[in-house]
Image (spheres, rainbow, N blue to C red):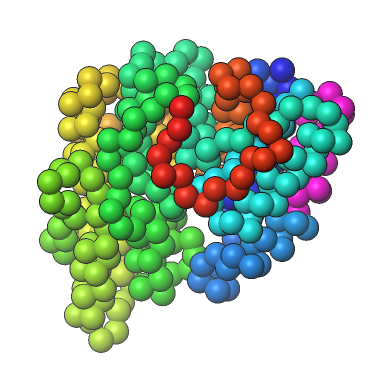
Amino acid sequence: MLVLGIESTCDETACAIVRDGKEILSNVVSSQIDLHRQFGGVVPELACRLHVEALLPVLEQALDEAKIPLEHIDLIAVAHGPGLVGALLIGVNAAKSLSYALQKPFVGVNHIEAHLYGALMGQEQWPKFPTLGIVLSGGHTSLVIMHEVGRYEVVAQTVDDAIGEAFDKVAKLLGLPYPGGPEVEKLALEGDPSTYPFKPGRVKKSPLDFSFSGLKTAVLYATKEHTNLSNSDKANICASFQETAFTDVVNKAVKAAEKYHCKALVFGGGVTNNKRLKALFAEKAPTLQTIWPPPGLSLDNAAMIAGLGYHNFIRHGPASLDLQAITRFPYWTE
Ligand code: KG4
Ligand code: ZN
């Protein structure tokens, strides 16, 4: 089955062609980052306009690279949330229009669930379920028991900022460009993580949940200790912040894996690009199998949408033209 994936939840316009949920024939991403960078973050209005402009050229490129004519597509899969409402509507309406014009079925895909599926796409053989899904992105921070593809239980979430958002905000405080994650990682390499004794966020009565807003405020106070922040002050702040946030993630993930009898960890979301995060898991959780997204599937992309769309279609059949863009998913539906 040839699936066309469409992704437009935030600031990437992406299309991909994937065969049978696994074999990636093309994976085209048009990023708007250069434009949003001058505003220090994503401007929703601009994002929508750029999705409209980019979608058809990106679709054409995805078909060209896969050497598949549009009429040979069997299914269209679109990320219908969570994300920015205007941005989502463009992908959702493109999928509906294509479905109607080509008389081919379409399905909606949960973008966050697709991030976890992206890691599985790189595996010859899937791990034994249940596994622990770890979502670390710009909008979400969750620990999820994956009973199988399509059946999940969320066991921990952030109560305030997402971890990627915290990286972006810390970068902004330090005058670093958007998106902040890669900048903080780079600068942290030159810093000493023990300079600032930052504390991870604790959530009363929910020991596995995350909170990053206190840590972010601690970083703000650290910046105020200096009248003029030198590069090495910034590097020490980045290293201390990153180490505190990631140690918290590793500790809670290990606890959750133990509690819910998971032997493998499946990672998703842009923050999982970070090398220090990978090193910390290798160091502190050596007995757990770790499954990271392969290159091209960690940041927002449409291959993960097409891949998971295939499974959604097999499980639930096609969506109807009533499919809505959903900015926030209250929980992961079956
Ligand atoms: O998954 P993603 O592409 O988009 C969302 O669905 O949110 O994640 C983007 C987030 C941004 O907050 C970005 O700063 C962060 O991932 N990020 C990183 C790294 N690369 C991207 N955070 C830490 N270290 C990185 N190397
Ligand atoms: Zn994402």
Q: Relative to residue 295, is residue 146 depicted above or below? A: above
Q: Residue at x 60, y 17 (%)?
A: 314
- From the top left corner, tell me how far across and down residue 108 is, in percent: 61, 35
Residue that sits furthest to the bottom in the current view: 227
Identity of the residue drawn at 68% across and 45% down:
92
Please identify the quadrant where the N terminus is shown: top right
Residue in view at x 23 percent, y 80 percent: 224
Overall secondary structure of the magenta section: helix
Specify whether 259 is left or right of 275: left
Residue found at the very far front of the displayed protein? 322
Q: Which residues are magenta?
A: 54-73
How many labels were placed on the picture? 0
Above/below status of 150 relative to 228: above
Q: Quadrant of residue 14?
A: top right
Residue at left offset 33%, top offset 23%: 131
Look at the picture and state if 281 lies above or below 316: below
> From where the camera sits, is residue 139 visible?
yes
Q: Which of the two residues, 320 or 302, is positioned nearer the viewer here?
A: 320
Which x, y percent locates residue 220?
26, 73
Relative horizontal placement of residue 235, taking residue 62 as reference (left or right): left
* Magenta span contains residue 145: no
Q: Is residue 173 above or below residue 119?
A: below
Instruction: Look at the image and tell me whether residue 13 can be seen.
Output: no
- Residue 147 shown left or right of residue 219 in the figure: right
The spot of residue 143 in percent (x, y) is 31, 37
Question: Left of 115 or right of it: where is 6?
Answer: right
Q: Please tell me whether residue 68 belongs to the stretch shown in magenta.
A: yes
Image quadrant in which you'd find residue 330: top left
Q: Position of residue 328 (x, y in %)?
A: 47, 50
